[in-house]
Each structure stands twice: as C-alpha cells, then as structure tokens.
Image (tube, rainbow, N blue to C red):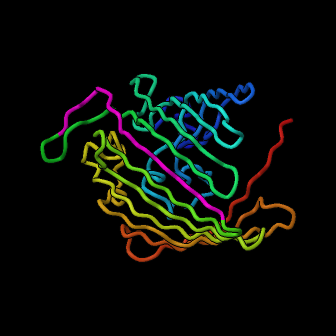
C-alpha cells in the first residue's frame, strides 16, 4: 500500500508515479509542467530506473528520489543540443509545498552521433538539522543549497559504447565535500544479447555530517554512508522474444566494499505497452 501513498504531497519517497506531465512546444521551444526526472547531467540517472541494476549503481541513485514535481523550460539548439532550465520540489524535504524548499538545475545535452554528453549544474534545496554528532544538532528551518555540477559523456565504437559520469556536491563554493565517478562499457553483439561492465568510486560522508548528500539525514542506512566506496560488476541481458525486446532476462554479478563478497542478481523484466489512442 505504501507504493500508492504520498503521490502528490511528498518529494522524498519513491512511489508508483515517475512521470505525470504535460508539454507545450512551439518550434524549438518547449515548456513542461508536472512530474519529471530532475535535470541531472549523469547517464546513470538518465536511464529508466526499472531497467537499471541497483547493485551496480551509486549511492545517489539508490538513496535520492530524482522524480520531482516542477516546471521545465527548454529549447533545441542546432537540431542536436537541448538546453533545459528546471525548477522542482526538493528530494531532501518531506512536504515541499509547506516547507518552501525547492531545487533548480540547468542542463545541456547532446544525443546525436557517436559522441554524446550531458552537463548540468544543480542547486539542491535542503532544510533540516545542522551541526554534527560531536557538537550536537539543532533544528534549522533555514534553506541552504547543495551545489552539484555533473558531467556525463558517451562515445560509440560500433557495437561498443564507453561512458563516464562525474559529479561532486558541496555547500562551499569550490570545495568538494562528496564526489562520484563511474565508468561503463556496453557491448551489444546482436539484437538479442548485450553486456554491461560498470564500476565506480565515491566519497560519501557519514549521515551525521551536515554536508552529507542525505541532506536532512532521512537516509539512515550506514552501509551506504561510506567515506570511500568502490563498486562494480558485470550484467548480461538476453531478449528471447522473436519480434520485439519487451522481455528481458538478466543476470548480474556485483562487488561492493560495503558488503562481504559478491552479490548475484537474476531476474526478468517485461514491458507492457498500452495504447490509449
């Protein structure tokens, strides 16, 4: 039942609704109102969440709700670039309409040709506790912003696609408090088979740190609050249906220094297409 709760009034939890929006376009310009992914310049965040593998993804992907309510204003430039200015509710507050805590982002993306990229600068609104575990906490109702530049690049070499993501987060102007870097190699030898090799490193401070990515310290899982986290693994995807790729079978072997040994994930994904017109 919790999957269907807090659809409209909470911005810090994952629920059944990822997208619910309307777009008006005129020529190369567009305006979108509703629920959309946050404009983050990372390929990991750009992928559909249900097609990703949590054990191959970063702490930010696992812990931050990136589907938020807001408005996007953008334009297509030279037929291959898209610039978007976005204002949304913040993933680091429970009730954004009451607290008045919001986030914003400016993103440029390219999706044409062998070389593609995403680049963004985001301000993530945070309201909650201030202080640390040594000196104590106090309730802080003022809004502060975590600054987060992001860059994701991809290059295709025939059936092989190499990707790189980098981002850091800070409340200071130029000081890196937390950072993520991750790389991927995707090999697609046929329409029925693909392989994904992925690895990453990140620095995420404990949840007691006021500069933590968790913001208001809603994240309480100490496993994902590592000072230095290494993760990576290999995923194999097989599409057995003859005429389409609606059914995907997958197997994943992953390593994470926050867990002992290797993890194995085997499953299936089926996309149901529903036509309403």
In screen coordinates, is 124 left or right of 187?
left
Residue 241 screen position, x and y as percent? 82, 66
In screen coordinates, is 187 left or right of 60?
right
Residue 274 screen position, x and y as percent? 80, 44
Would you say residue 237 is visible in this rendering? no
Query: Residue at coordinates 47% horizontally, 53% vertically from top-left?
Result: 62
Q: Is residue 86 above or below residue 159?
A: above
Query: Residue at coordinates 61% horizontally, 61% vertically from top-left?
Result: 155
Would you say residue 26 is visible in this rendering? yes
Instruction: Work out whether residue 36 or residue 160 is closer to the camera in this orientation and state it.
Output: 160
Q: Quadrant of the C terminus?
A: top right
In screen coordinates, is 45 left or right of 210?
right
Residue 162 included in the magenta stretch of the image: no
In screen coordinates, is 244 left or right of 26?
right
Task: State the image quarter where residue 80 is shown.
Answer: top right
Q: How many marks?
A: 0
Residue 155 included in the magenta stretch of the image: yes
* Magenta part of the chain: 137-156
Task: State the image quarter where residue 269 is shown.
Answer: bottom right
Q: Quadrant of the N terminus?
A: top right
Query: Residue at coordinates 28% horizontally, 26% vertically from top-left?
Result: 141
Instruction: Work out whether residue 206 or residue 26 is closer to the camera in this orientation and state it.
Output: 26
Task: State the image quarter where residue 24 is shown.
Answer: top right
Q: Which secondary structure class fits the magenta region best?
A: strand
Residue 144 screen position, x and y as percent? 32, 31
Query: Residue at coordinates 12% horizontally, 43% vertically from top-left?
Result: 135
């Amino acid at each position: 039942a919790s999957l269907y709760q807090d659809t409209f009034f909470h911005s810090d939890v994952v629920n059944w609704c990822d997208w619910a929006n309307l777009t008006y376009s005129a020529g190369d310009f567009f305006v979108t109102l509703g629920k959309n992914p946050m404009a983050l310049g990372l390929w990991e965040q750009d992928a559909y969440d249900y097609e990703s593998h949590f054990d191959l993804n970063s702490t930010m992907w696992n812990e931050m709700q990136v589907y938020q309510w807001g408005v996007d204003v953008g334009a297509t430039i030279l037929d291959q670039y898209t610039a978007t200015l976005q204002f949304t509710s913040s993933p680091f507050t429970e009730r954004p309409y009451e607290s008045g805590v919001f986030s914003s982002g400016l993103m440029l993306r390219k999706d044409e040709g062998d070389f593609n990229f995403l680049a963004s600068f985001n301000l993530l609104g945070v309201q909650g506790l201030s202080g640390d575990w040594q000196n104590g906490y106090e309730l802080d109702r003022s809004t502060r912003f975590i600054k987060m530049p992001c860059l994701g690049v991809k290059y295709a070499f025939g059936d092989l696609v190499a990707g790189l993501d980098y981002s850091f987060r800070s409340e200071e102007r130029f000081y890196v408090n937390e950072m993520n870097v991750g790389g991927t190699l995707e090999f697609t030898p046929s329409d029925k088979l693909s392989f994904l090799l992925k690895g990453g490193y990140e620095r995420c401070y404990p949840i007691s740190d006021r500069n933590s990515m968790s913001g208001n310290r809603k994240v309480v899982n100490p496993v994902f609050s590592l000072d230095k986290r290494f993760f990576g693994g290999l995923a194999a995807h097989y599409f057995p249906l003859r005429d389409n790729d609606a059914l995907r079978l997958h197997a994943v072997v992953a390593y994470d220094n926050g867990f002992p040994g290797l993890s194995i994930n085997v499953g299936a994904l089926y996309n149901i297409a529903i036509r309403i017109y």
